[in-house]
Amino acid sequence: MNYQYIDTHCHLNFKDFQEDADQALDRSLAAKTAVIIVGSETKTSKRAIDRAQKHPSGVYATIGLHPIHLEQALVENHSEEGDYAFQSRGEEFNYQEYLDLGKSPKVVAIGEVGLDYYHLNPNKDADLQKQKQKEVFIRQLDLAQELNLPVIIHCREAHDDLYPLLQDYQAKNGLGEKPWGVIHCFSGDLNLARKYIDLGLLISFTGIITFSHQWDEVIKEIPLEKMMIETDSPYLTPVPLRGKRNEPAYVQYVAKKIGEVKGLSQEEVGSKTLRTAMDFFCLSDLI
């Protein structure tokens, strides 16, 4: 199949798709949209691999321990990005276990990993939680280097710590000739986007850009070849489907919005971001 789009970040492995993940995936593939299913802990990483293994092409997996899963806590969000709540059981990062998972040919990246200060446990010391997040994140950057895989980076209310950490890591490891990481669901401004790109990172956009003009300047000024698109489904459903559960087939609306801002067709944005993702994740079977 010749694909037109790729959703570089979705969570068909989450409980929101417990009843119909296969159908959502079929709808995506029917819409000529390839899919990368992103892990956030051991359980969902294994589930991503299992689901990807059922498809010879067009479906891939990533593995990683998300910073919100380092602590046992009730995780909640109430904002224009959507409402959700779930219980994090708390997981200790096991390097060897993730190393073994990463040897699957279906695993194309380490992620999502990073820093999240929005969801810190209010009943525990904030500085200690932040330090633990940084330490585990660096170990997962090391894991990516050992497996020769790129990194999908999550950041929420932590750019002031994330950027210098990545800057230091990039300098120590000589990274940057080819993109080695992507800032998923980019939330910063144009200056920050340029700083990350200078480190050898890509910027990825979700459906948030369809219902907020906050990132129009970033989209307009950053070269298209430095971008990827994603849904982060089941979250962040784009216009015109706000209020519904998000799914990978809807990534076309993210491409449409980028095209409107940059004066390009939706199809051109889809084609170029697909090519960027193929190079970044080392995919060869999509065109």
Image (cartoon, rainbow, N blue to C red):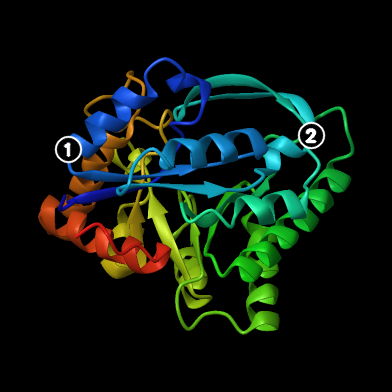
Would you place residue 112 above or below residue 42 in this image?
below
Q: Classify mark 2: residues with Cα within 10 Å, few (<14), some (14-19) or many (20+).
A: many
Residue 229: percent from the left, percent from the top? 33, 51
- Left or right, 87 with respect to 287, comes to right
Q: Quadrant of the C terminus?
A: bottom left
Residue 223 seen in the current view: no
Q: Residue at x 71, y 56 (%)?
A: 137
Between circles 1 and 2, the one closer to the viewer is 1
Please tell me whether residue 246 is drawn above or below residue 218 in the rendered image: above
Residue of label 2: 71
- Residue 168 is situated, as x and y percent measured from the top left of the image, at 70, 75
10 Å crowding of disc 1: few (<14), some (14-19), many (20+): some
Q: Residue at x 10, y 55 (%)?
A: 265
In the foreground, 17 or 269: 17
> Could you tell which of marks 1 and 2 lies nearer the N-terminus?
1
Q: What amino acid type should be assigned to the residue bearing mark 2?
A: Glu
Residue 31, labelled with which disc? 1
Q: Quadrant of residue 248?
A: top left
